[in-house]
Amino acid sequence: MKLLNIPPFDLEAAKAATNRQAILTKPLGALGYLEELSIKLAGITANPRPKFTKKGVIVMAADHGITRSGVSAYPSEVTPQMVFNILNGGAAINVLSRQANAKVIIVDIGVACDFQNIPGLLHRKIAFGTQNMLHGPAMTRTQAEDAIQVGLDVVFDEIDQGLDLVATGEMGIGNTTASSAITAILTETPVQQVVGRGTGLDDKGLANKIQAIHDATQLNQPDPSDPLDVLSKVGGFEIAGLCGVILGAASRRVPVVVDGFISGAAALVAVHLQPAVKPFLIASHQSVEIGHAIIWKHLSLRPILNLDLRLGEGTGAVLAFHILEAAARTLDEMATFSEAGVSDK
């Protein structure tokens, strides 16, 4: 797989933003984490006073063969049903995106359904869901690379149309199982410490899910030093697609607002593929999935929100748009002490 040219975090723009924060009409540090976020946004965009006018969430949808082994409380049929719901504007991500004035881009990258060119959906299907990782690799290495390329193509097209702040989102029954496997392997954490209840498993279902991940890992022997090998053997098409979104956005200096556990797993793969993308990531929230906290710790990222979310779709990331806009706007629009005629002594 050809690596992208990821630009460095712009220290000069970040320094200029830091200097401006010091002369705005407030005690230094009085806006807390908003000030840190504004400086980070300046460094990502190479703009000392960044502005965001076209926000969007890219929702990758795909199915997982592992669902046939009872790792989810919901059947795989829910995935295409929810895709239709998103297309019709009725999902949580639609409501929150309307509030945030953000575009929803929904991509079929591997749903086990023939959507027959339904309008509004980006048709980029790699296959009708992954294979059951309990019987062999979830996908081939070529399929994993193709799915990453889908993410690159989609985000580049959106950026060419003006997208300047992107959130990652996903839809796919069974994807917390794949994300748990990826997280356990890439963070070198025991499986039982990263596996949560997903869509609402009971104790028996949780135990089955942990065992399934253990068995799939033992069977496929993914190489922790090779993130593409891990992704292809125990991952999912939507996770690979989001990995491409992250890599592509970083290469174009667009801040990446990472959503929940599945998006976090995609960020893990992206950082292990190209460590230079790490400064371009913004952790939107801390979900109730136990593996999510492990991802943020591994990536040294501080989540903005903690609302006990566990929905996915990009919901937490789009909610964080409001905070990020506040950070950018206070940096840009507040008066300095000299402009306002206020004493800074």
Image (cartoon, rainbow, N blue to C red):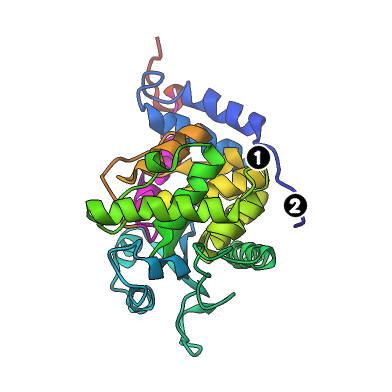
Q: Residue furthest left?
A: 202
Residue 257 numbered mark, or none:
none
Gap in Å between the C-alphas at discs 1 and 2?
Answer: 11 Å
User: Magenta stretch containing residue 326, yes or no?
Assistant: yes
Q: Quadrant of the N terminus?
A: bottom right
Is 25 rendered above or below residue 103?
Answer: above
Number of marks in the image?
2
Q: Residue furthest bottom?
A: 116
| Mark 1 residue crowding within 10 angstroms, few (<14) / some (14–19) / many (20+) | few
Q: Residue at x 55, y 64 (%)?
A: 138
Q: Residue furthest top?
A: 345
Q: Which residues are magenta?
A: 312-336
Of residues 178 and 157, the one drawn nearer to the viewer in this rendering: 178
Q: Residue at x 36, y 79 (%)?
A: 84
Residue 275 numbered mark, or none:
1
User: Magenta stretch containing residue 136, yes or no?
Assistant: no
**Mark 2 element type:** loop
Q: How far across and how far down the image is residue 241, in percent?
A: 56, 62
Amino acid carrying label 1: it is Pro
Give the mark nearer the N terminus: 1 vs 2: 2
Residue 164 shows in this picture: no
Of residues 184 and 115, the one drawn nearer to the viewer in this rendering: 184
Q: Which residue is mark 2?
A: 3
Q: How far across and how far down the image is residue 297, in percent?
A: 46, 32
